[in-house]
Image (cartoon, grey):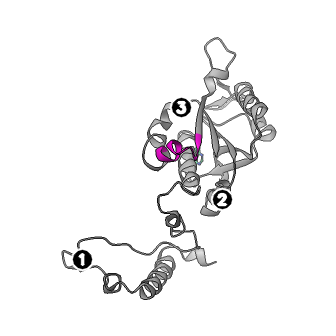
């Protein structure tokens, strides 16, 4: 998979993309991530990419020309499955959307900033608008990092144990059951006996029961 991220703050991605699972996925050539600094596509003297909004009001808006130049350069080089815009008024990110996106070859992710992007960018170029939750971040970068992480870990070969993404919360519509490791007892709290005994059939049944219990308690809406 190839992911092109368009942003005014490429440095914000240094951390999340250069460690752990995302780093290994790139090293194994399972994913290529390219960061494009929107300022490089500005034709203004001071490399400005934003401007005041028509009609007045607080907050700057990202201009269409640099965004169009960047997107058109990329789409002239290869075809993209989706051109995604990170925005708090987009479709709420859920596991099934991450699963779907993980099957694609080429994605562009545009990060909004300030008051957002000129509406015509959305009309002309964007095929999918995604929000990571009902709250407002200072820009789309952290949201894009969340999206990229949730998608890349689902690409076959990225996680060491292929099956481990299958047992994540949400994958089967349930939250994941509790997990334990050594020691078998800590401050009087014991690891459930069924896990220690090691009968796989009983362990599977226990895990399913716990997953259902946990989902009923914490996310009853998932049963709807
Ligand atoms: N940009 C700002 N807030 C956001 C959110 N909640 N989701 C996606 N992009 C955003």
Residue wearing tag 2: 97
Between 9 and 158, the one nearer to me in the picture: 158
**Range covered by the magenta-colored residues:** 23-32
Horizontal side, residue 179 vs residue 27: left or right: left
- The response on whether ligand 1 sits within 8 Å of label 1 is no
User: Judging from the image, what secondary structure is the residue with disc 2 in?
Assistant: helix
Q: Residue 37 magenta-drawn?
A: no
Q: Measuring 78% from the left and 38% from the top, which residue is drawn there?
A: 125
User: Judging from the image, what secondary structure is the residue with disc 3 in?
Assistant: helix
What is the quadrant of residue 103 in the picture? bottom right
- Find residue 50 and report its horizontal and vertical position in percent: 64, 25
Q: Residue 25 magenta-drawn?
A: yes
Residue wearing tag 3: 10
Instruction: Say the numbered circle drawn on residue 184.
Output: 1
User: Judging from the image, what secondary structure is the residue with disc 1 in?
Assistant: loop
Nearer the N terminus, badge 2 or badge 3?
Answer: 3
- Find residue 10 and report its horizontal and vertical position in percent: 53, 31
């Amino acid at each position: 998979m190839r992911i092109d991220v368009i942003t005014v703050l490429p440095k914000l991605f240094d951390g999340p993309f250069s460690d752990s699972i995302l780093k290994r996925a790139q090293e194994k050539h399972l994913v290529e991530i390219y960061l494009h600094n929107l300022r490089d596509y500005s034709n203004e003297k001071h490399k400005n990419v934003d401007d005041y909004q028509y009609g007045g009001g607080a907050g700057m808006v990202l201009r269409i020309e640099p965004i169009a130049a960047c997107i058109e350069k990329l789409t002239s080089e290869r075809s993209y499955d989706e051109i995604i815009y990170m925005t708090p008024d987009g479709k709420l990110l859920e596991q099934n959307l991450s699963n779907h996106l993980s099957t694609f070859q080429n994605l562009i992710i545009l990060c909004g900033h300030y008051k957002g992007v000129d509406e015509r960018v959305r009309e002309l170029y964007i095929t999918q608008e995604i929000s990571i939750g009902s709250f407002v971040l200072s820009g789309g970068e952290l949201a894009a990092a969340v999206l990229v992480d949730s998608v890349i870990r689902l690409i076959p070969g990225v996680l060491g144990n292929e099956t481990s993404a299958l047992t994540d919360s949400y994958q089967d519509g349930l939250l994941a059951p509790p997990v334990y490791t050594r020691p078998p007892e800590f401050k009087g709290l014991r690891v459930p006996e069924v896990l220690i005994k090691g009968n796989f059939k009983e362990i599977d049944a226990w895990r399913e029961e716990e997953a259902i219990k946990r989902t009923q308690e914490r996310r009853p809406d998932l049963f709807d």
